């Protein structure tokens, strides 16, 4: 039995570990960064604009108030939510920079970003698609240059504000996604081309191929991306209507039903964003007509845009206040309460398939600020409260302000690390707030008399409150707008027995100001600009607060500005914390052996669970000889490389069997 397991795992890991590059490792050396920072200074992903926060309210807020919870239940609780609730939408055209070059060379920092979330929420949800999916085609692997998985070219005919390129991709993209999924418990949405429903043989082939490769890692196929913009953007005629869309949808369903998929109820739509009201589409019969094929219902929505269409330019400083406070969130989600109720009645999950601070890349000074961290966390909690099942934060390229994480530009990729965006921290908080059980139910507490600056949420599991999230949106370093929330479970004036604990534990999300880029979560951060490998740095801080057993309350201090996540039980804290017995992240280190040559080495103790970040040249991956001109996929065809890969894989197999890395 052990022998068969070793052989099986060796086959798997020969593919996964073949691109690890190992040279003579010397002590780490400081790499000058001035040239790198100059090179990226004009790119949006590295923008350092800091905006001025709104003045604190006058008079100051009520800074000591009761947060009353009830044992058993509370009115208005959401459906059950999972720790993977806040995931990522990755533009198809940038997957090679973000996920990996191919299935044998994965981006280790990306794995680490995802592993952080898996360790807290149990799994990760990732959508691959976006504007580029509707003119994307599956081709043979030898059609993609340099052993990559995608190739881009400028769009022909369409006039999208984002100038998204056309994409061709190989099936190795799907294999790469599957490998990532197995390493960090990631599950995927994949976008199907909906450009011409009357001639979609390639889209059908994609569906067949993706289902076969991804297996149970496939969450569903998004059929069509923002079809309400097809007319304005030149993908259909200018009069394209909801009725036209439903006819096209039916045509594609007919083709997919004939494709011998193992599961026909796999589609996601309508993924409208802007010009159509989804409730009108539902009233036309969308939810009932396609019920047999529709797995989930999705929309896409950004609260604003930076597209500069027709000279309509938003001043970030004037716009900043619209991202600060709870009311801006509830006014957005209120637009979807009716549609959420309709989707719930139809028995389907409702997904916000793509969102972020603003379309067309976000705003300087807003999208990578602590205000955006708070905004995204509040947004996730509020959409969970109105019974959405998933929210995905969009990830674009280098010229994007709102990315949760950004790899370095290609010409710097062998020397410098990634850059962590402010909203990535929001995903950490949501993962910990919801935990790993899949039973989290969310309720808006309307705390402090529903004050815009001090919202709060409770998370229940199995009928009992287990966590509380408290926001302080005010930017005030004087302490005048710090507050204390006194949490009580039962007791007080409720007529119920008190079940308030004797102590609670708290983790804080903090930054010096709302405009700051320097965010910490529980005392840790992910490094500065061009300085992250996706792993949290520093010592995690969890504060224990003793409760007042006489008053039957737990007094939680919340500074301005910050977010507090309160764990009401030890079990709740354990469920939301990384398991020390499991491999959580994938260490990498940048060292140099020769002038101007950067080698990324992998800690041998975790060699079996990572792929390294590259060798001495951008495309020289998989060589064990410094300066080799052969690529990893080519070398793996040679006998010596196959033997070497198998040897490493066998070592990996022993590691995997002993640690249970592949256990789901």
Image (cartoon, rainbow, N blue to C red):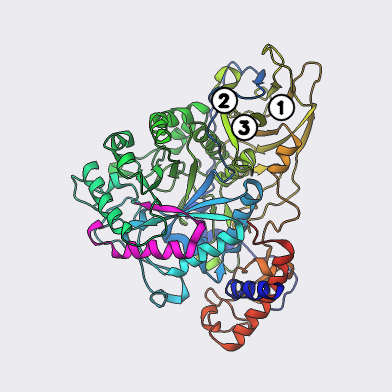
Left or right of 403 in this view: 119:
right
Q: Nearer the viewer, mark 3 or mark 2?
A: 3
Rendered residue at 65%/19% (across/down) = 68
Left or right of 235 in this view: 643:
right
> Residue 6, position in %: x, y?
67, 74
Left or right of 380 in this view: 497:
right
Determine crowd level at label 3: few under 14, some 14-19, many 20+ residues with C-alpha closer than 10 A: many
Rendered residue at 35%/50% (across/down) = 225
Which quadrant of the rendered structure holds the N terminus?
A: bottom right
Residue 120 seen by the camera: yes
**Marks 2 & 1, CB-CB < 8 Å contact:** no
Rendered residue at 54%/44% (across/down) = 86
> Residue 547, position in %: x, y?
79, 24
Query: Which stretch appears magenta?
Result: 196-223
> Residue 31, position in %: x, y?
66, 66
Query: In whole angstroms, how far apart are the C-alphas of marks 2 and 1?
Result: 15 Å
Instruction: Examine the structure image and report whether residue 253 is included in the region drawn in magenta.
Output: no
Q: Element at badge 2?
A: loop
Disc 2: which residue:
453
Rendered residue at 25%/46% (across/down) = 245
Query: In whole angstroms, how far apart are the C-alphas of marks 3 and 1?
Result: 19 Å
Image quarter of residue 595: bottom right
Task: From the viewer's side, name the closer residue of 367 and 442.
Answer: 442
Q: Nearer the viewer, mark 3 or mark 1?
A: 3
> Which of the labelled discs sits on residue 557, or is there none?
1
Looking at the image, is 474 positioned above or below residue 428? above
Residue projecting furthest to the front: 1
Query: In whole angstroms, how far apart are the C-alphas of marks 3 and 2?
Result: 20 Å
Disc 3: which residue:
459
């Amino acid at each position: 039995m052990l022998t068969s397991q070793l052989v099986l795992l060796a086959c798997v890991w020969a593919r996964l570990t073949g691109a690890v590059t190992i040279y003579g490792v010397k002590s780490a050396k400081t790499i000058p960064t001035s040239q790198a920072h100059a090179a990226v200074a004009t790119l949006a992903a590295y923008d350092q604009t800091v905006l001025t926060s709104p003045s604190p309210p006058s008079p100051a807020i009520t800074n000591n108030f009761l947060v009353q919870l009830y044992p058993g239940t509370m009115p208005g609780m959401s459906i059950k939510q999972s720790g993977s609730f806040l995931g990522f939408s990755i533009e198809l055209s940038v997957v090679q920079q973000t996920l990996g070059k191919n299935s044998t060379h994965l981006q280790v920092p990306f794995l680490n970003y995802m592993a952080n979330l898996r360790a807290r929420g149990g799994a990760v949800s990732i959508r691959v698609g976006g504007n580029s999916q509707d003119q994307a085609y599956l081709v043979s692997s030898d059609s993609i240059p340099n052993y990559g998985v995608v190739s881009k070219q400028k769009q022909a005919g369409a006039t999208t504000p984002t100038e998204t390129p056309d994409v061709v991709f190989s099936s190795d993209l799907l294999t790469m996604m599957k490998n990532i999924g197995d390493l960090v418990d990631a599950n995927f949405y994949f976008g199907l081309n909906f450009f011409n429903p009357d001639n979609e043989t390639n889209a059908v082939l994609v569906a067949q191929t993706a289902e076969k490769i991804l297996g149970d890692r496939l969450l569903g196929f998004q059929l069509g991306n923002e079809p309400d913009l097809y007319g304005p953007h030149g993908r259909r005629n200018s009069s394209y209507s909801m009725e036209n869309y439903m006819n096209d949808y039916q045509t594609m369903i007919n083709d997919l039903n004939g494709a011998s998929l193992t599961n026909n109820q796999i589609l996601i739509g309508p993924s409208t964003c802007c010009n159509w009201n989804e409730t009108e589409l539902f009233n036309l019969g969308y939810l009932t007509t396609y019920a047999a094929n529709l797995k989930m219902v999705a929309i896409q929505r950004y609260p604003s845009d930076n597209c500069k269409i027709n000279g309509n330019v938003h001043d970030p400083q004037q716009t900043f206040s619209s991202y600060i406070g709870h009311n801006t969130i509830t006014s957005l989600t209120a637009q979807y309460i009716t549609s959420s109720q309709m989707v719930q009645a139809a028995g389907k999950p409702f997904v916000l398939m793509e969102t972020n601070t603003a379309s067309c890349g976000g705003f300087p000074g807003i999208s990578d600020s602590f205000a955006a961290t708070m905004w995204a966390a509040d947004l996730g909690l509020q959409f969970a409260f109105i019974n959405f099942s998933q929210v995905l934060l969009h990830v674009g390229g280098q010229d994007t302000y709102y990315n949760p994480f950004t790899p370095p530009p290609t010409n710097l990729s062998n020397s410098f690390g990634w850059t962590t965006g402010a909203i990535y921290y929001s995903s950490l908080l949501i993962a910990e707030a919801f935990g790993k059980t899949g039973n989290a139910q969310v309720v808006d507490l309307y705390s402090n008399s529903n004050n815009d600056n001090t919202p709060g949420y409770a998370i229940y599991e199995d009928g009992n409150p287990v966590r509380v999230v408290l926001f302080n949106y005010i930017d005030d370093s004087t302490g005048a707008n710090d507050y204390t929330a006194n949490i009580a479970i039962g007791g007080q004036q409720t007529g119920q027995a008190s079940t308030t604990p004797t102590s609670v534990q708290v983790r804080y999300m903090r930054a010096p100001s709302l405009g700051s880029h320097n965010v910490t979560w529980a005392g840790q951060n992910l490094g500065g600009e061009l300085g992250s490998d996706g792993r949290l740095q520093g010592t995690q801080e969890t504060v224990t607060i003793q409760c007042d057993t006489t008053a039957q309350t737990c007094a939680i201090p919340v500074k301005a500005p910050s977010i507090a996540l309160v764990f009401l039980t030890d079990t709740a804290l354990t469920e939301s914390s990384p398991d020390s017995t499991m491999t959580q992240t994938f260490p990498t280190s940048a060292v140099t052996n020769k002038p101007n040559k950067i080698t990324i080495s992998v800690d041998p103790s975790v060699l079996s669970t990572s792929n390294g970040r590259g060798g001495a040249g951008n495309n020289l991956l998989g060589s064990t000889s410094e300066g080799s001109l052969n690529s990893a996929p080519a070398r793996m065809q040679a006998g010596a490389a196959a033997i070497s890969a198998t040897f490493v894989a066998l070592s990996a197999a022993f590691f995997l069997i002993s640690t249970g890395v592949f256990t789901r």
